[in-house]
Every structure is written in structure tokens, then in C-alpha cells.
Amino acid sequence: MSNELTDKDNESLNTSRITHYTSRILGIDTSCDDTSAAVIADGRKILSNIVSSQSDIHRKYGGIVPELASRRHIEMIWPVVDEALKTAGLSLTDMDAIAVCYGPGLIGSLLVGCGFAKAAGYARGIPLVAVNHLEGHIFSTFLESQKPEFPFLSLIVSGGHTSLYMIHGFGQYAELGRTRDDAAGEAYDKVSKLIGLGYPGGPVIDRLAKEGDPKAFDFPRAYLPDSYDFSFSGLKTSVKLTVERNPGRAGDQAFLKDIAASFQAAVTDVLVRKTEWAVVKEGTKRVVLSGGVSANSELRARMKQMAEDREVALFLPSLELCTDNAAMIAAAGHYRFLAGEFSGLDLNPKACLPL
Ligand code: KG4
Ligand code: ZN
């Protein structure tokens, strides 16, 4: 079995010729507040990618309530897997492996996905592949028509992580830096809650920022010289103080738009500049941006400009592959499957799991 597919091979793959696939992987992700299942052929072709969002449940609390998240996963896991299989036109017994995210994430949520994957695998005799959620985010770009070659620089920006890695090959990951406090997505969500825009904060701030003045407020940028680490908690506090100093403007749309635009400019400046430093210092020719915040329009545009200026290739997941999804778990699982790296029924989820 080989993962060396040519572009011609990939073009010839389609759902009417599914028997020609060398691997069919069912991916499952229940790491946070989305229940997702996907079927991927040959690690590249998405036959289905179903995501059941829980945003409506958590919105009124201004953030994720872990107990509610795991309960909803229990209700949704089988319907979502069923829909993923039906959309792919396949059944569970057609799967060569079940790739499940086993961490990092919310432990109650992870338990549901892992428990389901173990039970389904055991019942149908299908091998189990354990995938790190961050590995999934990195490999989301491998589902795009242009996939990156190794080595590459990877910036993961999500609700739980903001980290820079050098990726030398599959399973060969060197961390360069990470956030010392809040993740970028977490800062988006907290600022959004602070100014009454609800959860999740990223998409709504992204939208509002387009109509605001990014120079209206001079929010701090923590560049942390001589380090690839990040820090966003000072920025969040600065936004909080600005809001508190302007009590009369709480419902003023122009004020909120300026806050959103100025906050987003500060986050983007740091993410782009630190990535640019890493490009120069590490001498890399390829950059992969992934995770929920990589859906941000300003970040995508600024990163593209930086890549052009520095003459490096930039790889971005399409918007539906930025935020949590099981297709990326199956994509990473495909490589573990090819390497024969299977897990047993003793697989346990881990809330904290380094890459
Ligand atoms: O990767 P993800 O779906 O879940 C984690 O692994 O954490 O990322 C979710 C995060 C949330 O914090 C959400 O606010 C943020 O991604 N996000 C965005 C955008 N879309 C989602 N942040 C900025 N701009 C966006 N357009
Ligand atoms: Zn994620």
C-alpha cells in the first residue's frame, strides 16, 4: 500500500469508482463543541464531512459549557457518523480504519468520540487509529488540491492553541513557540463576550472589523523579542479597560466596529510578524496556516501578502476545513494507517496532549 498518488491518480478517483481506493478512513472528532464525522479516500479525497455545531447551546453562556458539550456529543455521535457514511455511499464495514481524535480537548467530549470509535471498531473488526487534534489541523491542508511538501513552517491558530512548528515529515514535529497565556481564538471569543457580541467571537469580530477603523485604538502587540512564543492576555485586558473607560458607548455600533477592527489588527500584526520572523530565521520555503482563526479574512490576506513579499509558498485550508472537522482527522489518520500505527481498546483520551 502506498501513499504516493500522482495528480493523475487523484483526478481519476471519484465516488463511482470507490472500489479502487487504497484506503477508506472514517474520521471522528468530538474534541470540543462540534460533533464531526467524515469519510476520506486515500488520505486526499473527501467523500463526506459532516459537522454538527453546538454553538446554539453554548451561545447563551458566552462560551463552551463542557458538561453540555459531552451530553450533546452522546446524542449526536451516531446520527453524524451515519450521515457521513450515507453521504459517502458506504457502510461501516467498508472502512479500512477508524481515525479518532484522542486529544487535546475537553475530556468529557473526547471520551464520547473515543468510546464510540472503540465500540464500532471492535464490533466490526475495524482497526483503530489515534490522531492528535493538532496533527489534524496541520494535515487539513493536505486535503486541498495543492498540498505542501516537507519541510514546512506551521502556524496553528485555534480556540485552544497558538503555536509555531517546523514540520520535517509525518510524525516529525519540532515546536518553535506557543502562547504563554490565551490562544488567539480564545482572545477573539473573550473580547466578543466582553463587548456583547456572543460566541463564537471570531466570525462576528471578523465581520464587524471590516467596517471599523483599525487605528482607532492603539492596542498592545506582544512581540516577545528573541522568542517564538505568543501572548494575547495583555491585549484582551487592554480592550477591557478601553470598554470600561467608555461606559456611555457600550451599545454604540461605530465604537464596537472600531474596537473589533483595532483588536483584529493587533492580533494579525503579531501572528503575521512572528511567522515572518520564523520564515527568515528558519529559512523555510513553505508556510502552512491552520486552525479556526485561519478562517479570518484579514489574517488570510495579510499572510498571503507576507508570503508574496518573502517569496514563500503559503498553504491555507479552505474555510470549511479551518474550524474543527473530522476530515482533517481522517487525513492525518491515513498516514498513521499506512505506517501501521494502530491503537488497541486501551486507548484513552487525553485533555492535554503535546504534538
Ligand atoms: O480550530 P477550532 O474550530 O477549535 C479549536 O481547536 O479550538 O477554532 C475555534 C476558534 C474559535 O475561537 C473561533 O472564534 C475562531 O476559531 N474563529 C475565528 C474565525 N472563525 C472561527 N477567529 C477569527 N476569525 C474568524 N473568521
Ligand atoms: Zn481545533
Image (cartoon, helix red, strand yellow):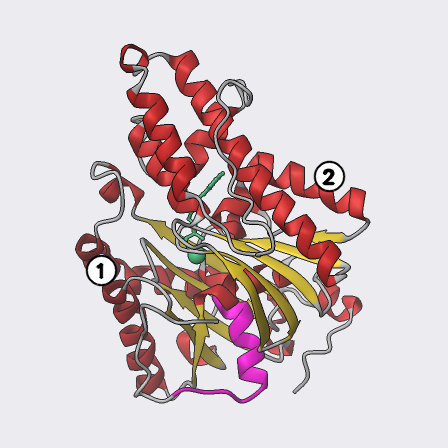
User: Which mark is on residue 180?
Assistant: none
Quick one: SS at disc 2? helix
In the image, the residue with mark 2 has its CB under 8 Å from the nearest atom of ligand 1: no
Closer to the observer: label 1 or label 2?
2
Quick one: SS at disc 1? helix
Residue depicted at 78% across the width and 71% down the height:
6
Residue depicted at 75% across the width and 71% down the height:
9
Q: Residues within 10 Å of mark 1 (few under 14, many from 20)?
A: many
Foreground residue among 289 and 139: 289
User: Which mark is on residue 305?
Assistant: 2
Position of 325 relative to 3 (above/below): above
The answer to whether residue 145 shows anywhere in this view is no
Give the mark nearest the N terminus, 1 or 2: 1
Residue 250 coordinates in the image, percent (x, y): 30, 16
Q: Is residue 225 magenta?
A: no
Task: Tell me the quarter of the picture where residue 236 sits.
Answer: top left
Q: How many marks?
A: 2
Q: Residues within 10 Å of mark 2 (few under 14, many from 20)?
A: some
Residue 334 coordinates in the image, percent (x, y): 56, 76
Magenta segment: 329-343
The answer to whether residue 249 shows anywhere in this view is yes
Residue 57 coordinates in the image, percent (x, y): 23, 43
Residue depicted at 50% across the width and 32% down the height:
264
